[in-house]
Amino acid sequence: MLHRNGSSALQRARQRARRHFANPARRRGLLIAFEGPDGSGKTTQRKLFKTWLKSEGYDVVTTKWNSSELIKPIIKSRKTVRALSPEEFSLLHGADFRHRVEQTILPALWQGKLVIADRFLFTGLARDVARGLDLDWVLKLYQPLLWPDLVFYFAVSPVTSGKRVTATRLPNFYEAGQDVTHVEDPVESYQHFIARVIREYESLALIFNFITVDAEQSIGDQHRQIRELFLEGQRRPWSEWNLDAVADWLARTGEP
Amino acid sequence: MSASKPRLIAVDGIEAAAVIAAARRALGSPARGGISHWDASGVFQELAVADEAAGAPSPRTLLLLYAADLAFRLRWEIRPALAEGYTVVAAPYVETAVAFGRAAGIPAGWLANLFRFAPRPAERRFVHRSGRRNKAGVDGFVGFGCHQMRGKPGGRTPRQIMTGAARELRKLARRNTRKVKVKSFNS
């Protein structure tokens, strides 16, 4: 009985989601993800892009990786004592992502806002697979999948990433992947680990059709390219791929 | 090293006190091994004291956290003890979380994938609710989850989810009787 009610609630939620997002009379929410390895300059570009969008009249919400108020403290305390296995690392970041999807991203999209995600689920996929976990297992943790309207991938070489990250500080234990490389020197470990992460990112870029930005060009050139690509891509119709994710959220929360 | 063959025994149920009692019975002598409890990693203890403004976790978020806690238990408690020749009673193990997820409307496929990393126990025991309300009302993972979610996720009250989880657990017990040794108890 409970399940029958549950599935009919899900059906109703799917219809409601489709009506809401596919309505051409309404300015629909947009989700733009910025992805790339550390030191690729995506945060700089995200800030420039946000400033420009606001000047163009967009209502912009930003969400960053590993930033939910509920889960972030749990992850932080475990990272501090280096207590996470690859599975725990993956599952806790998955929980953080799910909480932000439900509490921040979907409510903002429903209200017609533009959400910029500084790292999205692809960060979890690239890092977890680089840590030796199975891509299929990790990808399914993130179901029901919410696909961004655009994914900008900031491509840099492992050498550039390493130079930029280590120019002012030492990478931390998990950032350097020392939990899996077992290399004592964080800089050396980072070079090994980031090469693996970039390899995974490049595979994901092909599979999921990211828009690759050459992050070795000047900041101004990258920003202009992002603006142009955004203006070309923003009029894309709503993706039915997102129906399950929105319906799941609507059915659970009854929002808005 | 224990003289008997090391075994992983799963004890699943809704009410924590009944699950612990069944786990003690399953273990028999403490010299034979130990019991692995949920929240050994302290994740849920931290969640319980989180600021309300952080937002209530959904069933999926709670299940991801349960899986993270189980990964911790496997790494630090269950696998090392088995490797040393001891018996471990995991109380609760996977099926309690699956029953909670099913009662909250989470697809079975997602739940199966989530717990793919957990080894199959040599024996499963199920503790079924008697229908009496637990004194605390919120103990154990299912009670804690229902309490944490607040409101009516998916239009279901916490009580409906508790009842639904108990029903799902009975189904899982019936299904598992064909696969491994199963014992069911009424609390």
Image (cartoon, coloured by chain):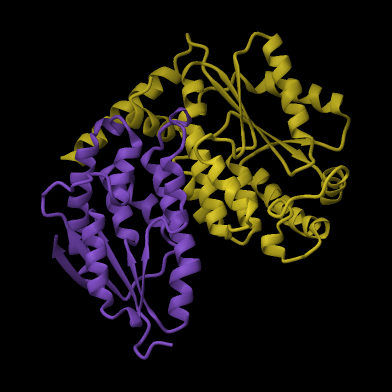
Chain colours: A yellow, B purple
At 39% from the left edge and 24% from the top edge, which residue is drawn?
Answer: A17
Spot the residue most to the bottom. Answer: B3
**Side of A162 where B133 appears, left or right:** left
Q: Is B35 placed left or right of A240 in the picture? A: left
Snapshot quadrant of residue A216: top right
- Is residue B105 visible to us here? no
Does residue A180 appear left or right of residue B18 in this picture? right
In the image, residue B96 above or below residue B148:
below
- Quarter of the image where one finds residue A248: top left
Residue depicted at 79% across the width and 57% down the height: A186
Instruction: Point out residue B105 in the picture as x, y percentages from the top left corner.
Output: 29, 42
Q: B60 or A186: which is nearer to us? A: A186
Where A100 sits versus A37, above or below? above
Q: Residue at x 32, y 61 (%)?
A: B92
Q: Nearer the viewer, residue A230 or B127?
A: B127
Of the 4 image quadrants, the one containing the N terminus of chain B is bottom left
The number of numbered badges drawn on the structure is 0
Residue A119: x and y in percent read 64, 37
* x and y, in percent, of residue A124 in the image: 60, 47
Left or right of residue A160, residue A114 in this image:
left
